[in-house]
Amino acid sequence: SVLLFGLFSIATALAWNYPTLLLARLLTGVGLGAALPNLIALTSEAAGPRFRGRAVSLMYCGVPIGAALAAALGFFGLAAAWQTVFWIGGIVPLLLVPLLLRWLPESPVFQRSARGVPLRTLLAPGNATATLLLWLCYFFTLLVVYMLINWLPMLLVGQGFSPSEAAGVMFVLQFGAACGTLLLGALMDKLSPLWMSLLIYTGML
C-alpha cells in the first residue's frame, strides 16, 4: 500500500490531462486507504492496551504534520509548481518501502490466527449494528476532514485572501489538528469510547 500511494503520488505530478490526473489520485487514495488502517492496527498491537491511544495518535499525527509542511511550502513560496508537493509525497514513501520490508514486523494477531476471518463476520448478528455505526462515523468524519483540506484554500482565495495567506491558514489548521490528535490520544487512554466520541463530535460542531 505504501508503494502504491508513493508511485501514484509521483504519477499525479506527471499527469498530462484530467483523466490521468483523476486515475492517479484514485489509486493514490486506494493506497492510503489500505495503509492507514493497517498502521493503526499494527500500532495498537505493539503499544498494548495501556498506551494504545497515545501510540496511535502519535503515529496518526503524521497526517496533519505532513499537510502542515505542504502548506508551509506554499506560504513561504517554496513550491514553484503544484507538482512539487506530489514529488515529495511520492519519493519519501518509496524510500521508506525497503525499511518497512526489513524492519516492520508482521501483526502478532495475524500470525496467531489459524485462518482468516470472512468479511461476512462483520455483518453477522451481533456485529452488524456496531460495524455499520463505525462505518458511518468514519465516513462522515473523513467527509468533513477532506472537505476542509480540499475546499478551504479555494474558498479563502475566493473571499479575497492571497494564495500565501490561504496556505498560512491551512498551516495553522493542520498544526492545530496535530496538537489535537496528541491531546485526544492521551485522553483516549483514560476516557470511555462513548465520552471520547461525544467530545470529538462536539468539537467538530
Image: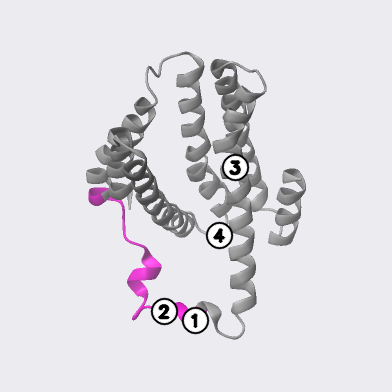
Disc 4 residue type?
Pro
Disc 1 vs disc 2: Cβ atoms closer than 8 Å? yes
Under circle 3, the secondary element is helix
Residue 117 is labelled as: 2
Q: Which residues are magenta?
A: 101-121
Give the alpha-carbon distance from disc 4 to disc 1, as whole Å: 24 Å
- Residue 44 in the image, given as x and y percentages of width and height: 49, 57
Q: Please tell me which of labels 1 and 3 falls first in the chain.
A: 1
Q: Nearer the viewer, mark 3 or mark 4?
A: 3
Q: Please tell me which of labels 4 and 1 falls first in the chain.
A: 4
Q: Nearer the viewer, mark 4 or mark 1?
A: 1
Q: Please tell me which of labels 3 and 4 falls first in the chain.
A: 4
Residue 49 is labelled as: 4
Give above or below for 93 relative to 133. above
Q: Name the residue: 76% across, 54% down.
A: 198
Residue 121 is labelled as: 1
Residue farthest to the bottom, as pictured = 125
Q: Is residue 175 visible to us here?
A: no
Give the alpha-carbon distance from disc 3 to disc 2, as whole Å: 34 Å
The residue to which callout 3 is attached is: 147
